[in-house]
C-alpha cells in the first residue's frame, strides 16, 4: 500500500491482552446483501455485495460499561439521557424527526479521549487485531468535506460570508463609478447618497449577522452528526463524522438512510483528489465501514429497537436485536433504520458508532469484513440471485459476463442482412464472423444476467439453470476463441457457431418446463399466478433468442450451397401464399391426428406475389394461427350434425405491410380472456400438455400446442422485423387474427 495522505491516520491503539481465536468473537450473523453489477475503474464490471456482520464478544463487559458511563454518567438510569451531554437535535435526514444525540462538545471530548478514553482505545485495539491485514482509520471528515464549499460536484455553495463580501466589493466599485460621474452634482445629492449607503450597510450587517448565526448552527449540526438512527444520517456529503452516539426512546421516529457512499462525495476535496469517486468495495480502494456498538447492560426481548437492514433489490431485509456489547460491522452504503423502543422500555437504547475507512496493506487487494475463518456469508435477497453462478464458475468468468451485460447490443435489419449477404465473398464472411465474435457474447451475457435475477425463485429451477448453463458455456467458448484475422479463422469460428446453434435448439421447451413448474407451485400455495414480471422477462428473452438464432443461422447459411432466390436464411422471393399453404397442410395433418377430422381452409390472395422474408418465421406464425382456428372450429362443431364452416385465410399486399388475415367461426374468445392470450402458460385448449410430458430434447410448434406459447412467441417473430400480430374476437361467433409483416425490411431488431 502506498503511503497514506497526512490527513488519513490509522486508529490509535494500545496494548491489549485480547486475541482473536476460535469462537472469539462469536459470529452471530454474517450476511451478504444488495447484490448488483457495478462498473469498475478499469472500465469493466464486477458482481458486488454489501456485508453486515454481527459479532458477540468483541467488546467485553467492562469495556461496554466504561463506554456507557463515559457517555452518560456513572450509574445513570434515567428515562432519558443526561441533558448535560445529550440533546434532542439529531435526525436521520434533513427535516426529519429530532432525537437524542450526543452534544458536539461531548463528542469532541470523546474523540480526544477525555471521555472513556481507555475503553475507546480497547475497542480500536481489538478491531486492529481482528483485521491485521487492513489499515483502519477514522473517516477524515475535514478532508472529505473540504471541497463542499467550493461549489464543485456534489458540494455546497460558497459560504454566505464570502458571497456577502463579493457583493459588497461589487457595490463599492459601482458607487465609485457613480461618484466619478456625479462629481459636479449638488452637495444635497451627495448627502442623500451617503444616507442611502449607511442604510444599505446597516442592512448588510444585519443580514451578515443572521447568516453567520445560521452558519454556526450548521457547523454545530455537522460536528455532532446528523444521524439519529444507528450509523445515523442520510447519504449526504456532510455525514462523515468519525463518531456518533444515539439514545432512542419510545415514540421516536426514524428514517431509512445510508451512512456514506464513496461514489457520492463532494469534489474537489483532498479525499477526491487522492482517491476519486468509486463504488464502495472497489478493489484497492478505501472501503467505508461503520462499527455499531450496543451499550445497554440488558435489553429484554419486548423492548424492540432492532436495527433493520434493507436489501434494495428485493425490498426485503434482516434485523439485529440489541444485546450488551454486541458489535455490528456494516458497509456504509447499506440502507438501514432503527425501530423505536416499545413503551415497555424504561431507559433509552444507547448505541455508539465509529465511522471507519478500511484500506488493504497490500496494494490492489480487496478489503473484506467477513473473515474467511468465519465461513461463507449467508447470501440474502438480491445477493442470493447472483451467487449461484459464482458457485459453479470462476470469479473471472462471472465478472466478464456481467461486464459484457453492461454493454449495449447492436441491432441489425433485414435489409442490412440482405445487402451484406448478397455476395458472400471471403472478406464479407470474415467481417461477419468478426461482428458475431464481438456481438454474441454481449447478447448472451444480457440473458445470463436476467436468468440470474428472476423473481419468485424461478432462477433456482433446474430447467432454468440448465438454460443458463448453456448460455454461460457458449459465452465462454466465444470469449475463448482468438481474434479472427483471415478465412482460416473464419471457418473454425463457423464450426463453433454450428455447435452453439445446436446446443440452444431446445431452449423454448426447457424454459417452458421451468416456468410451468413455478406456476404449479404457486397454484398449490394459492398465490397469484398472473406473474407480469415473468411474462415481461420471457418476452425479452425469447425475442433475444430469435435474434441470436437469426444472426448465427444467417452466417452458417452463407456457407451452405446456394439456394435459388435465397440469401442465407432469407428468401428474396418469399411467397406468403405458398408458405401459408404449407402451414395449412401441416396444421390440418395435426388436427386429423388429434380429432380424426379437420375443417377446410380456404386461402385467398395472389399466388404470384413475393417479397423478401424468412420463410421459417412466416411458416411458424401462420401455422400457429391456423392451428388455433382449426382447434376452435373442431371443438365447437365436433358433436353437431352441421358441417364445420371453413377457415378463411387472406393474403393482402400493401405498400408498407403484407397482412395475412385468418378468420374462423370457432366461437371466439371471451373479452375477459383476450388480455391473457398474450401471456405464457395460458391456453384455451381443452387438453394441455403436462409438465412431465414436456421433453427437453424436442423443439417446434407442435410440442407447444395447447401449452400457451404459440401466440406470444408468434407475435415476437412478427415484431422482430417490424411487424405485429393482433387478435379481434366476437364471443359466440369467431376470431379474426391479423398478421402484419413489414415488407420494407428497414426496421432494426427490437432488442430487449
Image (cartoon, grey):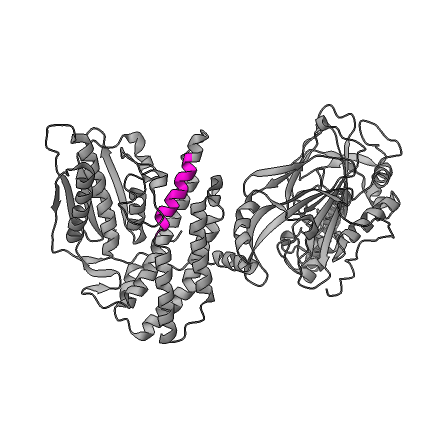
75 shown above or below 412:
above
137 shown above or below 73:
below
Q: Nearer the viewer, residue 152 or 410?
A: 410
Q: Nearer the viewer, residue 614 or 177?
A: 614
Q: Classify residue 71 as left or right of residue 282.
A: right
Q: Classify residue 495 as left or right of residue 149.
A: left
Number of residue marks: 0
Q: Classify residue 15 as left or right of residue 222.
A: right
From the top left corner, tell me how far across and down residue 674 is, in percent: 30, 34
- Verify whether residue 720 appears in magenta: no
* Residue 666 is at least partly visible in this image: no
From the top left corner, tell me how far across and down residue 5 is, in percent: 76, 62
- Quarter of the picture containing the N terminus is bottom right
- Magenta segment main secondary structure: helix
- Verify whether residue 511 appears in magenta: yes
Q: Residue placed at 47% from the left, 45% from the top? A: 459
From the top left corner, tell me how far across and down residue 356 is, in percent: 74, 50
Q: Which residues are drawn in magenta?
A: 506-520
487 shown above or below 546:
below
Q: Nearer the viewer, residue 358 or 158?
A: 358
From the top left corner, tell me how far across and down residue 176 is, in percent: 71, 58
In the rendered image, the residue lying farthest to the top is 344
Quadrant assignment, res 636: top left
Q: Which of 169 and 563 is in front in this view?
A: 563
* Residue 22 is at least partly visible in this image: yes
Quadrant assignment, res 614: bottom left
Amino acid at each position: 500500500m502506498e503511503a497514506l495522505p497526512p490527513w488519513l491516520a490509522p486508529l490509535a491503539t494500545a496494548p491489549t491482552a485480547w486475541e482473536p481465536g476460535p469462537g472469539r468473537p462469536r459470529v452471530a450473523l454474517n450476511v451478504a446483501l444488495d447484490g448488483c453489477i457495478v462498473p469498475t475503474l478499469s472500465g469493466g464490471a464486477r458482481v458486488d455485495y454489501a456485508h453486515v456482520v454481527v459479532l458477540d464478544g468483541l467488546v467485553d463487559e467492562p469495556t461496554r460499561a466504561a463506554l456507557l458511563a463515559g457517555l452518560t454518567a456513572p450509574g445513570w438510569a434515567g428515562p432519558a439521557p443526561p441533558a448535560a451531554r445529550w440533546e434532542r437535535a439529531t435526525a436521520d435526514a434533513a427535516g426529519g424527526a429530532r432525537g437524542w444525540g450526543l452534544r458536539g462538545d461531548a463528542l469532541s471530548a470523546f474523540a480526544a479521549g477525555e471521555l472513556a478514553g481507555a475503553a475507546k482505545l480497547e475497542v480500536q485495539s481489538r478491531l486492529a487485531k481482528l483485521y491485521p491485514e487492513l489499515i483502519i482509520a477514522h473517516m477524515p471528515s475535514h478532508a472529505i468535506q473540504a471541497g463542499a464549499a467550493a461549489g464543485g460536484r456534489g458540494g455546497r455553495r460558497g459560504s454566505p460570508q464570502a458571497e456577502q463580501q463579493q457583493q459588497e466589493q461589487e457595490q463599492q466599485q459601482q458607487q465609485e463609478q457613480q461618484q466619478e460621474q456625479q462629481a459636479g452634482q449638488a452637495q444635497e445629492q451627495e448627502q442623500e447618497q451617503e444616507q442611502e449607503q449607511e442604510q444599505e450597510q446597516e442592512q448588510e450587517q444585519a443580514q451578515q449577522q443572521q447568516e453567520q448565526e445560521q452558519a454556526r448552527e450548521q457547523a454545530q449540526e455537522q460536528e455532532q452528526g446528523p444521524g439519529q438512527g444507528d450509523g445515523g444520517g442520510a447519504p449526504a456529503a456532510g455525514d462523515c463524522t468519525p463518531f456518533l452516539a444515539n439514545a432512542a426512546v419510545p415514540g421516536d421516529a426514524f428514517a431509512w438512510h445510508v451512512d456514506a457512499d464513496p461514489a457520492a462525495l463532494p469534489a474537489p476535496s483532498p479525499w477526491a483528489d487522492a482517491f476519486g469517486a468509486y463504488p464502495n468495495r472497489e478493489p484497492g480502494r478505501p472501503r467505508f465501514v461503520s462499527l455499531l456498538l450496543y451499550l445497554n447492560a440488558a435489553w429484554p426481548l419486548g423492548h424492540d429497537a432492532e436495527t433493520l437492514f434493507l436489501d434494495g433489490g428485493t425490498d426485503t431485509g434482516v434485523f439485529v436485536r440489541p444485546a450488551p456489547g454486541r458489535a455490528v460491522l456494516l458497509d456504509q452504503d447499506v440502507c438501514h433504520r432503527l425501530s423505536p423502543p416499545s413503551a415497555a422500555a424504561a431507559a433509552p437504547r444507547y448505541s455508539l458508532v465509529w465511522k471507519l475507512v478500511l484500506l488493504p496493506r497490500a496494494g490492489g487487494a480487496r478489503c473484506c469484513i467477513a473473515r474467511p475463518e468465519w465461513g461463507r456469508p449467508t447470501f440474502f435477497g438480491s445477493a442470493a440471485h447472483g451467487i449461484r453462478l459464482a458457485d459453479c464458475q470462476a470469479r473471472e468468468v462471472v465478472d466478464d459476463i456481467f461486464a459484457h451485460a453492461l454493454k449495449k447490443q447492436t441491432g441489425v435489419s433485414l435489409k442490412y442482412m440482405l445487402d451484406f449477404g448478397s455476395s458472400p465473398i471471403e472478406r464479407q464472411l470474415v467481417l461477419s464472423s468478426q461482428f458475431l465474435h464481438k456481438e454474441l457474447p454481449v447478447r448472451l451475457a444480457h440473458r445470463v444476467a436476467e436468468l440470474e435475477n428472476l423473481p419468485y425463485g424461478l432462477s433456482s429451477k433446474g430447467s432454468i439453470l440448465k438454460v443458463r448453463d448453456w448460455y454461460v458455456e457458449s459465452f465462454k467458448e466465444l470469449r475463448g476463441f482468438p481474434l479472427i484475422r483471415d478465412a482460416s479463422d473464419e471457418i473454425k469460428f463457423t464450426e463453433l457457431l454450428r455447435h452453439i446453434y445446436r446446443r440452444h435448439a431446445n431452449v423454448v421447451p426447457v424454459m417452458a418446463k421451468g416456468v410451468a413448474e413455478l406456476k404449479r407451485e404457486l397454484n398449490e400455495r394459492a398465490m397469484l399466478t398472473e406473474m407480469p414480471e415473468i411474462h415481461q422477462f420471457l418476452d425479452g428473452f425469447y425475442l433475444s433468442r430469435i435474434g441470436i438464432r437469426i444472426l448465427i443461422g444467417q452466417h452458417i447459411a452463407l456457407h451452405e450451397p446456394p439456394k435459388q432466390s435465397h440469401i442465407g436464411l432469407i428468401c428474396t422471393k418469399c411467397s406468403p401464399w405458398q408458405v401459408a399453404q404449407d402451414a395449412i397442410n401441416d396444421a390440418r395433418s395435426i388436427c386429423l391426428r388429434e380429432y380424426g377430422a379437420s375443417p377446410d381452409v380456404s386461402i385467398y390472395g395472389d399466388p404470384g406475389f413475393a417479397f423478401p422474408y424468412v420463410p421459417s418465421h412466416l411458416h411458424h406464425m401462420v401455422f400457429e394461427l391456423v392451428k388455433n382456428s382449426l382447434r376452435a372450429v373442431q371443438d365447437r362443431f365436433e358433436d353437431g350434425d352441421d358441417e364445420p364452416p371453413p377457415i378463411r385465410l387472406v393474403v393482402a399486399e400493401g405498400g408498407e405491410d403484407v397482412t395475412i388475415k385468418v378468420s374462423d367461426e370457432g366461437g371466439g374468445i371471451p373479452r375477459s380472456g383476450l388480455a391473457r392470450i398474450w401471456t405464457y402458460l395460458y391456453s384455451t385448449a381443452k387438453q394441455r400438455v403436462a409438465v412431465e410430458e414436456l421433453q427437453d430434447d424436442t423443439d417446434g410448434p407442435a410440442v407447444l400446442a395447447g401449452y400457451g406459447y404459440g401466440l406470444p412467441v408468434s407475435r415476437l417473430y412478427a415484431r422482430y422485423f417490424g411487424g405485429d400480430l393482433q387478435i379481434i374476437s366476437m364471443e359466440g361467433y369467431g376470431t379474426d387474427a391479423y398478421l402484419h409483416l413489414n415488407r420494407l425490411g428497414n426496421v432494426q431488431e427490437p432488442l430487449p
